[in-house]
Image (cartoon, rainbow, N blue to C red):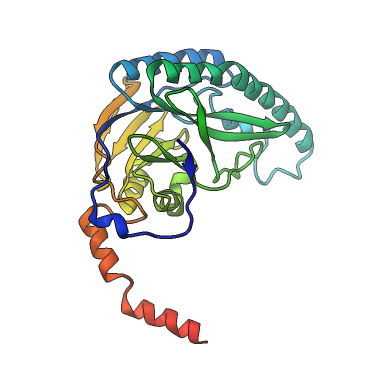
Amino acid sequence: MRSTKFSGQLDHSHLGERLKMEPFAISGISFMPEMWKEKANLKTLLGHIDEAAEEGAQVIASCEGVLDGYITKELPKHRIQPGTEKTRGYAQRVAKFRKRQESLAERIKKNCIPVLQKKAAEHQVHLFINTLDLRRKQAVYNTTFVIDPNGEIIGKYDKIHAAFEVVNKLGKGYPVFKTPYANIGVIVCADRQFPETARAVALGGANVLIINSYGMWGEGANERFIRQRAYENGLYLLFCHPNETVLCSPEGRVIASTCPWENVLIRKIDPEPAVGRGLFGNREMAQTYSIIGDPSAYTSRKKKKKGK
């Protein structure tokens, strides 16, 4: 299994075919992780993974910052955020926070990720787990680890739209991970607010999109984004947040969500109807779009520009 990146070529050739995929059980885990307490968070996460796997889940995802507790939430308290770079003592505050952050990320790398690799192999599941990832000194990423049923890390996605996470490096590119069940793409939290992120994943061939998230919740704040991203791209979408897990169909309908007292959502989905490739909601609409194409007025405008 390997990850792929969008090549820039939009291929409609598969629209008349039925994808050779079988239904599978996907699960999202929601709980509020404690900041800086990776041991306690790991223990809670493992218990929920056990529960999901015992109920038949084959692909399991977590909320954002599930092991570190999303510690960048504390940055404003330390006056470390865009716009404060010229304030007195800024460099010292950043250095102090980064030192503590790197220590936490190192503990996660050494003591937590190997345990999750063993857990994936134990239950023969795919895990999509988001936490800090230390690559080298002062290079910490907000990363979703993709672990396969052999316990191998088959790839990572690094959050891209995170300029406010001053102490984290930003990612590049939108990988799509091939699994026996579906092609699965990943974005993280703020990424979901930009149509281009989900579109890039869909153009990369994904049938399913997982969003690991932490911020913004309540009053339908997330639903308006995730339903739209699912519909715009004809993807199943699993949204995992500390307060809720939501599953959307390729038509943009919420087909499952957790209640406040639930920590684990499990549903069987059939990836075959998912259109993907950056097309809309269902196969019929996608076929119509590929036949009709751009409006003639838009096409004429493009030709005039080329003529100039």
Q: Is residue 76 above or below residue 45?
A: below
Q: Residue at x 26, y 68 (%)?
A: 291
Q: Residue furthest left?
A: 284
The location of residue 302, given as percent across then percent down, is 43, 79
Residue 110 percent across, percent down from the top left: 62, 18
In this view of the protein, can residue 49 be seen by the observer? yes
The reply to whether residue 219 is in sight is: no
Q: Residue furthest bottom?
A: 308
Percent position of residue 67, x then y: 53, 22
Labels in figure, total: 0
175 left or right of 82 in image: left
In the rendered view, tell whether residue 254 sits above or below residue 149: below
Q: Position of residue 59 (x, y in %)?
A: 36, 28
Q: Is residue 58 above or below residue 20?
A: above
In the rendered view, does 9 fall on the left or right side of 141?
Answer: left
Specify the quadrant of the image occupied by residue 279: bottom left
Quadrant in the picture for residue 292: bottom left
Tell me which residue sits at (36%, 48%) in the image: 229
Q: Which corner quadrant of the image does residue 46 belong to?
A: top left
For image coordinates 42% across by 24% down, the residue present is: 149
Quarter of the image with the N terminus in it: top left
Residue in front for this viewpoint, 192 or 115: 115
